[in-house]
Image (tube, grey):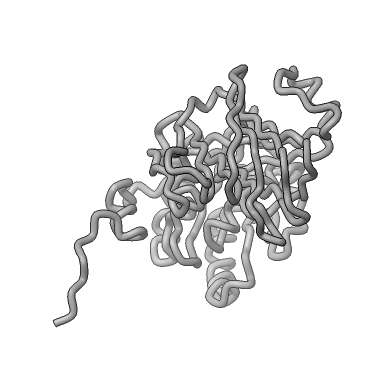
Amino acid sequence: MRIVIVVNIRKQRVKPAVQELLPWLEQRATVVGVDNHAQLDLEQIDADGVLVLGGDGTLLSTARRLKGRQIPLMGVNFGRLGFLASFTPQQLREQFERFLRNELPISHRHMIEASVLPAKSASANLSPDELASRRRFVSTALNDAVVTAGPPFRMIELEVGADAETGVRYFGDGVIVSTASGSTAYNVSAGGPIISPNVDAMCITPICPHSLSFRPVVIASTSTVHIVATRVNEGTTLFCDGQDSTKLSAGERIIVRRSARDVLLVENPDAREWRTLAEKLHWASSPQYQK
């Protein structure tokens, strides 16, 4: 098997781990590249798998850099939570051997594509070819596409709708469009629901809406979300997975739809969905009282 190793050397424990693991990995697979500065062109490199040593952020960045290539990602968590990078450093050797024997489950996680149309050319009903020719910005995300108010941090006005339905206008600090995989990230912090990664859905979650009744909405992943930046701040920005971004101007339209290609994620068979929520987010935990 030919593998690429993507390394986040900013994490303190990663560099010594790579130095220790690399000889062991090279005895079991053909290492075609070690990428520690995001310089390799993952869209072109010839590999059968990608081993990501870092955390969820490193895996999110790697998924976008693959540009839809169907190469399994195996994430080893050196960060805090590790929802997507679900293997621990202690599990790596044993589980990597299983990966080489094709014994680990691989799931399809859907990504979203966020496009920005200039104000004068904005339209909600465009074919993929028309959208590609008119947009000024496009990026993909495995977790979420987020419009944030930005400095000077006044409330902004957005119009949010899906498919052919007329959108609703509201004031607030922005909006999150998350995948099921990203529902445990910014979405849950903003009061959105936790969605099982097995559910083919997206969630629209307002950020601090100036309304008592604007609740998050779960929609089909086949839907197309359109967001019009009716009134914005100088720093109002669209972020994709918190990494790729562009500033927004009044009147511009953001189109969020399912990406044409999924991400192949190597799953940890020892991780259980509900137990992971309890361990990492303290879901359903009882209050801790001091004695």
Query: From the viewer's perspective, is 219 left or right of 127?
Result: left
Instruction: Name which quarter of the figure residue 126 lies in.
Output: top right
- Count of marks overlaid on the render: 0
Indicate the position of residue 136 as horizontal and vertical percent values. 84, 37
Q: Residue furthest bottom?
A: 291
Query: Is the C terminus in the top left, top right, bottom left or bottom right quadrant?
Result: bottom left
**Residue displayed at 23% across by 60% down:** 285
**Residue displayed at 67% across by 40% down:** 140
Is 25 drawn above or below residue 145 in the view shown? below
Indicate the position of residue 47 as horizontal and vertical percent values. 66, 44
Query: From the viewer's perspective, is 181 left or right of 147?
Result: left
Instruction: Name which quarter of the figure residue 281 lies in.
Output: bottom left
Query: From the viewer's perspective, is 91 left or right of 85?
Result: left
Is 21 drawn above or below residue 284 in the view shown? below
Indicate the position of residue 52 as horizontal and vertical percent values. 57, 56
Nearer to me, 212 or 237 = 212
**Residue displayed at 52% across by 43% down:** 206
